[in-house]
Amino acid sequence: MTDPRDLMARYQDGDANAFRELYALVAPRLLGYLLKMARSRDVAGDLLQQTFLKVHRARAAYIRGTDPLPWIYSIAHRTFIDEARRTKRAIVKVGAEDAVPEVPANISGQSVDRAEDPVDPELTKAALDALAELPEAQREAVVLTKLDGKSVAEAAAIAGTTVGAMKVRAHRGYEALRKLLGRKAEGGAA
């Protein structure tokens, strides 16, 4: 696999092929992240294009030798926030009623390709509904650390916060999810 640092340095030097390789490397995962945040394939696709346009415009500001992925994710995150503010969305929906989005992890956080038991669609929907009820900062922390598999440091860089703050957001998000899912289980059993 090509090193993103090398691709970004070559891109800064004017190598158009390096940009194509960087896009091919980053775009699928970045689109997944944006899809989870925006909950719309069309909006996520637009945000992806806006993100790479901003990356192109700001490529001179990139610090050579650093990992460009947190920088690019941070641009994508800010682009999402700008879009959410522009459209005055108070709440970002995590899932539509009719369609459960593809998630790379099951409810326990285990990778779907490693899961021994099939994923329960009702449990998945309940988890996504509970995730939608979380405050945006906690939801983002859970999505980045559990669903996207980012380290706390990577998630903090993407969200533009400190590692400590990301740990707190993630922990509070996990605790809130446990309570919400526990409440739904009690309500469903009655």
Image: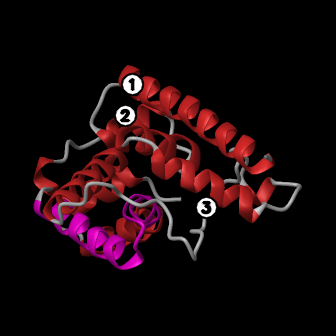
Which residue lies under the disc numbered 2?
156
Label 3 residue SS: loop
Residue 163: mark: 1
Q: Tell me the residue at 39%/24% (across/down).
A: 163
Query: Are there few (<14), some (14-19), or many (20+) residues within 10 Å of tag 2?
Result: many
Which residue lies under the disc numbered 3?
103
Amino acid carrying mark 1 in the image: Val
Label 1 residue SS: helix
Query: Are there few (<14), some (14-19), or many (20+) residues within 10 Å of tag 3?
Result: some
Closer to the N terminus: mark 3 or mark 2? Answer: 3
Question: Is residue 46 among what the camera can see?
Answer: yes
The location of residue 77, given as percent across then percent down, is 29, 52
Q: Is residue 25 above or below residue 161?
A: below
Amino acid carrying mark 3 in the image: Val
Q: Is residue 110 above or below residue 177?
A: below
Judged from this view, the residue extending furthest toward the bottom is 42
Q: Tell me the residue at 49%/47% (across/down).
A: 143
Label 2 residue SS: helix
Magenta residues, as a range?
31-57
The secondary structure that dominates the magenta segment is helix
Query: Does the segment drawn in magenta span residue 106?
Result: no
Q: Are marks 2 and 1 in contact (CB under 8 Å)?
A: yes
